[in-house]
Amino acid sequence: MIYLLLYFEFFKVAIFTFGGGYASLPLIYDAVVQNNAWITAQQYADIIALEGIAPGPMAINVATFVGTLIAGVPGSIIATLGLCTPAMFICIVVARFYLKYKNQNLVQSFLSSLRPTAIGLIAAAAITLFLTGIFNNGDGSIVIENFNIWSVFICAGGLYLLRKGRINELWLIVMGFGLGVILYPFVS
């Protein structure tokens, strides 16, 4: 039963996500943390951090990590298939129609209306991860008294290096990992 539910939850995420991996994060969070309570918000934040250093598409990696936590290797396969199945069929159908009707105003209007929605979903994921990292209570809940100044410094330094230092994102992830390993004993 867990496999069927796992497949269905990730299938729903794939059906209702427009905008790529970041846009799927709030929907995955709702499915696995809030609606089904399979994992905690802290575990979800850890999965997102691990996903950042793993190669491959974000949503697929997250589905694989979550599926593994919930139901082992079979769960990872089922969650990943649940996430991929709709995309395969939708891409086949949309590609056929897009090639035929791409210059029509209705199609262009539809695509233009999806962009702000995708931006909103990405912003929601970023805000949730930021608040969890800065005000984490250990169980994933946000508690103002648990303000973590080190997380703020790491975030600000990372943003600065990304925007002004023109550092490659991969090196930024590696540096964040290193700082986390070094600072964890002092801030936990």
Image (cartoon, rainbow, N blue to C red):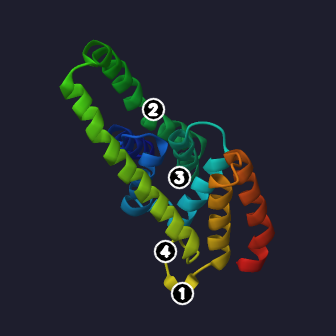
Mark 1 packing: few (<14 Cα in 10 Å), some, or many (20+)? few
**Residue closest to the eye, 96 or 50:** 96
Tell me: 10 left or right of 101.
right
Kindly report which numbered mark, 1 or 4, lies closer to the viewer in this rendering: 1
Q: Which mark is residue 84?
A: 2
Q: Which corner quadrant of the image does residue 145 belong to?
A: bottom right
Cβ atoms at labels 1 and 3 below 8 Å apart: no
Tell me: residue 3, above or below residue 184: above
Q: Residue at x 50, y 70 (%)?
A: 131
Kindly report which numbered mark, 3 or 4, lies closer to the viewer in this rendering: 4
Q: Determine the secondary structure under disc 3.
A: helix
**Residue closest to the eye, 60 or 107:** 107
In percent of width and height, residue 98 lies at 30, 19
Name the residue at the front extreme: 164
Q: Earlier in the sequence, mark 1 or mark 2?
A: 2
Q: Which mark is residue 70?
A: 3
Q: Earlier in the sequence, mark 2 or mark 3?
A: 3
Q: Which mark is residue 5?
A: none
